[in-house]
Amino acid sequence: MDRWHTDYLDHPLYRPVRHLVPPLSGWPDQAGYDALLAAARAGGAPLPSGLRFVCELEPEAYYESHIGATGEVPTRRDNWHDWFNALAWLAWPLAKAALNRRHLRAIAGGEAKRGPLRDAATLLDECGVIVAVADPALGRALDDMQWRRLFVERRADWGRRVDAFTLGHAVMEMGLTPHIGWCGKAWIVEVDDGFFALDDAARRLALDARLAALLDDDAELPAPRALCPLPLLGIPGWWPGNEDPAFYDNTAYFCPTRRAKSSTVTA
């Protein structure tokens, strides 16, 4: 069994969920998950009314279908992956509910055994990092994999005109053991300049509502390729080694691939 701890919470990856973690001495049991959910509801989180994390539940229907029909989220005990899934539901309740609705629509439309719409939703749910940008040039730099432009030349804009917010629970689990090669899947969301005048909680709430609206339109994020690879250790403040610009010379990690649409990005 993995040892319970909260040492990871200081890393910026966990900023969206940090405030949700109670001072537990060990893994939560069913009562612990119920208390976690009750505390979030008391704090005003717009969670689906029937949502509950049910320990050791083995649904007969598809995972997403069972959640949609009952509100019950199958949750394994003493399991990091499912712990972070619960935290993601509490931090991003509107977006997570919209992801479930998208799965249900896709299943009803013939994607019962997966297809592009469900694959994209699953990738966002597992590995998604929302990158909010107030300058479209920063979004293009990410989409075109212009890593030095994004992380070195425009470094001062991080936290001021561009920022990253973790949604995916698998990427949170992987963050327990960060390593060179660690990547997420970025969804670029354009915001106005006023977004970066908000505090962290208000930014997350605004993004949650925006993501839910986008996910309810199946023309948005129609396939996995709509998400960009994001080398997470390159984000300023996410890894001590990236203070040195030479860190980004590692082309095995910061490599433009055939996804990159151009060799230059207009600033």
Image (cartoon, grey):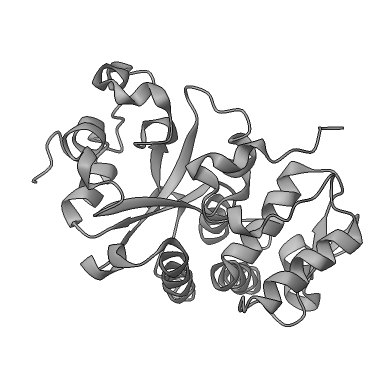
* 156 left or right of 237 in image: left
The tally of labels here is 0
Name the spot of residue 17 as percent of width and height, x first. Answer: 59, 55
Q: 259 and 94: which one is in front?
A: 94
Q: Residue furthest bottom?
A: 49
Placement of 155 over or under 214, stated as above or below:
above
What residue lies at 31% left-to-right and 30% top-to-bottom? 257
Residue 113 seen anywhere in this rendered image of the structure: no
Residue 45 seen anywhere in this rendered image of the structure: yes
Q: Residue furthest left?
A: 266
Residue 261, by quadrant, is top left
What residue lies at 51% left-to-right and 51% top-to-bottom? 15
Q: Quadrant of the N terminus?
A: top right
Placement of 80 over or under 111, stated as above or below:
above
What residue lies at 68% left-to-right and 71% top-to-bottom? 40
* 210 left or right of 257 in image: right
* 25 left or right of 250 in image: right
Name the spot of residue 200 as percent of width and height, x first. Answer: 43, 61
* 256 left or right of 166 in image: left
Residue 174, by quadrant, is top right
Name the spot of residue 39 as percent of width and height, x first. Answer: 73, 70
Name the spot of residue 205 as percent of width and height, x first. Answer: 47, 71
Q: 150 and 13: which one is in front?
A: 13
